[in-house]
Image (spheres, helix red, strand yellow):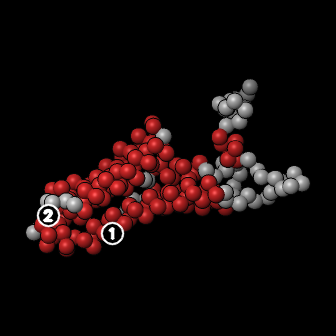
Amino acid sequence: MTSDSPPPRRSGVSGRTVQDYIDETPLWADATPVGHAPITQMQWLIWGLAAAGKFFEGMVVFTTGVALPLMGKEFALGATEQGVVAASSLFGILIGASAFGGLADRYGRKQIFIIEMLLFCVFTAVLALSPSYAVAVAALEGLASRSGATIRPPISSFRKAFPAAGWCWRRSVSRRWAAWWARPSAS
């Protein structure tokens, strides 16, 4: 083994890794390789889940801004309290992105993504039924922390679903999406 050769890869029972299956080149019926593999249904599903997670994150920030005047009337909030309500979702995104990313690395993206969706439902219900300003702020932070958690797990799942060998337009697009999602939010 020379220093230029890659280290041996762990493999499953069949001697192939999961990435080997993802990188597999499809073949036509006559056994000739397909030059450009189409996106599979599983890759579309992963992309859809990742996009839905990012959509919900933006939706939380947007609807908080839209509902802020109504919340101000409902809870008789001053300018400072309205500022806290508006900032609570962004602060929650910061906390969620910091905490859940490491948890996804430790316990698996799929499990954490399922927990994120359950937390989204719970905190949405708590926010809708919040009887006070403090409960509303706590629910917004919890809701947004779940939203911030959608940054790393879907992106890494999305990136792993595409072939690693060679350059193709999908890798380029996935890199651009990952860069777009990983950027600091301007909202």
Decide: few, some or many residues near mark 1? Use Cα within 10 Å; few <14, some 14-19, many ≥20. some
Task: Give the secondary structure at mark 1.
Answer: helix
Q: Which mark is residue 83?
A: none
x, y percentage for residue 134?
A: 15, 56
Residue plotted at (14% across, 70% down): 74
Q: Quadrant of the C terminus?
A: bottom left
- Against 95, residue 85 (above or below) is below
Residue under label 2: 81
The structure residue drawn at horizontal position 57% and vertical position 51%, both measured from the top left corner, is 159
Which residue is at 73% across, 32% downward?
14
**Where in the figure is residue 54, as x and y percent of width and height?**
44, 60
Q: How far apart are marks 1 and 2 (CA)?
A: 18 Å
Is 87 located above or below residue 8 in the figure?
A: below
Disc 2: CA contacts within 10 A as few (<14), some (14-19) or many (>=20): some
Badge 1 is on which residue? Answer: 62
Q: How many marks?
A: 2
